[in-house]
Amino acid sequence: MVVDLAGEGTPGWRGEYVEDPTQQAAGEPVYLLGEAYLQILVSGVVYPTEAGAQPFESPRTITPESGGVIQDVRYGSEFEGQVEIWIGLTSNQPFPVSLLEDPTRVVIDVQRP
């Protein structure tokens, strides 16, 4: 999965599996397809109301048509310079995360079982 980013600076990220997906700050449940839930936080983003911010222009929910390990992807909240992304998977799998440049993007590479 690739998160395309615009603007200047270098983003950070953190990813982990969680038992019960809940929205950062609000604590509301996040409903995902799948048996394992991966939370990715991308940091260093601007608030949508800040000058120069570009609006999020993709669907907030993506359900892949293939029968792969990724079952569901949800764009979550933006809070304190972090964007929350949820990935519902068939099972816990290793997921290296890397940064690519020109253009800037964060890549989450969920391995197949």
Image: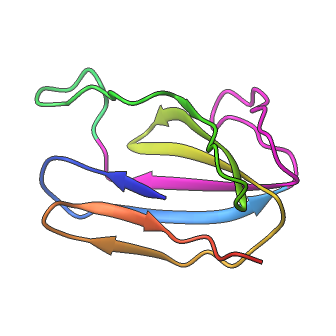
Predominant SS of the magenta segment? loop
Q: Position of residue 63 (x, y in %)?
A: 64, 38
Left or right of residue 27: residue 10: left
Q: Residue at x 37, y 63 (%)?
A: 106
In this view, 27 is above or below 106: above
In this view, 25 is above or below 12: above
Q: Residue at x 38, y 43 (%)?
A: 81
Q: Position of residue 52 (x, y in %)?
A: 11, 30
Left or right of residue 45: residue 50: left
Q: Position of residue 2 (x, y in %)?
A: 41, 57
Q: Residue at x 33, y 29 (%)?
A: 56
Left or right of residue 12: residue 111: right
Left or right of residue 107: residue 60: right
Q: Position of residue 25 (x, y in %)?
A: 63, 33
Q: Which residues are magenta?
A: 19-45
Image quadrant occupied by the C terminus:
bottom right
- Furthest toward the front, the residue is 66
Q: How is the image coloured?
A: rainbow
In this view, 7 is above or below 74: below
In this view, 56 is above or below 39: above
Q: Is residue 21 magenta?
A: yes
Q: Nearer the viewer, residue 28 or 74?
A: 74
Q: Quadrant of residue 89?
A: bottom right
Q: Residue at x 31, y 31 (%)?
A: 47
Q: Is residue 4 magenta?
A: no
Mark count:
0
- Furthest toward the top, the residue is 49
Q: Nearer the viewer, residue 75 or 51?
A: 75
